[in-house]
C-alpha cells in the first residue's frame, strides 16, 4: 500500500529552482531518509509533504491512512507556558467541549422547573457528549502523560516553564505536540 507518492515535483523561490523533478513513493512499512546540503530543498519538500506548501509543478498524493506531523526547525512554544499547558493546546477543541459539557450540567441542574429548557439543554448535552466521546475526550490527559513519558519527559517537569527547558527538552516537547 502506497502511503505517499511524489511525482515530478518542482518548486522555485524568486526564480531560484530549489526542487526539480523529484519523484519517489513510500510504501507502508518502508523507511526513508532525506539527506542533502543546506539549501537543497529538504525543508521545502517536507513542508509540501505535510501539506503546508504546494509544489509549483508535479503532484503529491497522500494515502488515506497517512498522518503527517511536521516539526519546524524553530519551535512555536510560548516560553511562559508550563509543559502541561503547552500540551493542553493540542487538545483545545476537546477542552472547549469539556467546559461546555460542565456548563450544561450546571444549567440542567437549575432547569428542573422549565421542562422545555431542560429538554433543549439535554439535547445539546447529548450531542456534545457524543462528539466528546468520539474525540476520545475522556482520555486526553492520559494520552498527554503517555506521550510525554515516551519522550522522556517525566511528571516532575509538567509544572516547569517552557523557557527553563534545555534545547533538547524543548525539541522533545515540540515533538510531543505533533
Image (cartoon, rainbow, N blue to C red):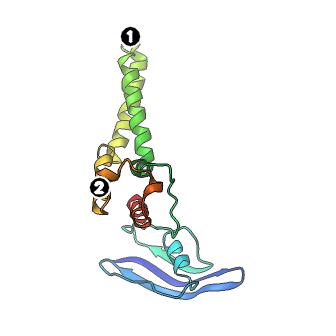
Determine the residue positioned at 51% across, 53% down: 78
Determine the residue positioned at 41% across, 58% down: 177
Q: Position of residue 77 (x, y in %)?
A: 50, 57
- Circle 2 — which element? loop
Quadrant where the N terminus sits is: bottom left
Mark 2 sits on what residue?
A: 154
Looking at marks 2 and 1 on the same chain, the residue that comes earlier in the sequence is marked by: 1
Assess disc 1: are there few (<14), some (14-19) or many (≥20) residues with their C-alpha within 10 Å of its C-alpha: few
- Compare residues 25 and 43 and report the one nearer the observer: 43
Quadrant assignment, res 152:
bottom left
Q: Position of residue 120 (x, y in %)?
A: 42, 24
Q: Position of residue 161 (x, y in %)?
A: 44, 51
Determine the residue positioned at 37% across, 42% down: 131
- Compare residues 65 and 13 and report the one nearer the observer: 13
Measured in 3D between alpha carbons, the distance from the residue under mark 2 to the one under mark 1, in whole angstroms, is: 49 Å
Q: Position of residue 52 (x, y in %)?
A: 55, 67
Q: Comparing marks 2 and 1, which lies closer to the viewer?
A: 2
Q: Is residue 76 left or right of residue 145?
A: right
The residue most toward the right is 14
- Compare residues 143 and 2 and report the one nearer the observer: 143
Assess disc 2: are there few (<14), some (14-19) or many (≥20) residues with their C-alpha within 10 Å of its C-alpha: few
Q: Are marks 2 and 1 in contact (CB under 8 Å)?
A: no
- Circle 1 — which element? loop
Classify 109 as above or below 166: above
Classify 155 as above or below 166: above
Q: Which mark is residue 113?
A: 1
Amino acid at each position: 500500500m502506497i502511503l505517499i507518492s511524489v511525482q515530478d515535483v518542482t518548486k522555485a523561490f524568486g526564480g531560484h529552482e530549489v526542487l526539480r523533478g523529484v519523484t519517489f513513493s513510500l510504501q507502508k512499512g518502508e523507511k526513508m531518509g532525506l539527506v542533502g546540503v543546506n539549501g537543497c530543498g529538504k525543508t521545502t519538500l517536507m513542508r509540501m509533504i505535510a501539506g503546508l506548501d504546494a509544489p509549483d509543478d508535479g503532484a503529491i498524493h497522500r494515502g488515506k491512512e497517512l498522518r503527517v506531523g511536521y516539526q519546524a526547525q524553530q519551535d512555536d512554544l510560548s516560553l511562559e507556558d508550563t509543559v502541561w499547558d503547552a500540551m493542553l493546546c493540542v487538545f483545545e477543541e476537546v477542552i472547549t467541549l469539556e467546559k461546555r459539557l460542565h456548563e450544561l450540567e450546571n444549567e440542567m441542574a437549575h432547569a428542573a422547573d422549565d421542562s422545555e429548557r431542560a429538554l433543549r439543554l439535554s439535547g445539546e448535552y447529548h450531542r456534545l457528549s457524543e462528539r466528546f466521546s468520539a474525540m476520545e475526550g475522556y482520555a486526553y490527559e492520559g494520552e498527554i502523560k503517555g506521550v510525554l513519558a515516551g519522550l522522556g519527559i517525566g511528571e516532575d517537569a509538567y509544572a516547569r516553564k517552557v523557557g527553563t527547558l534545555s534545547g533538547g527538552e524543548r525539541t522533545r516537547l515540540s515533538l510531543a505536540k505533533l
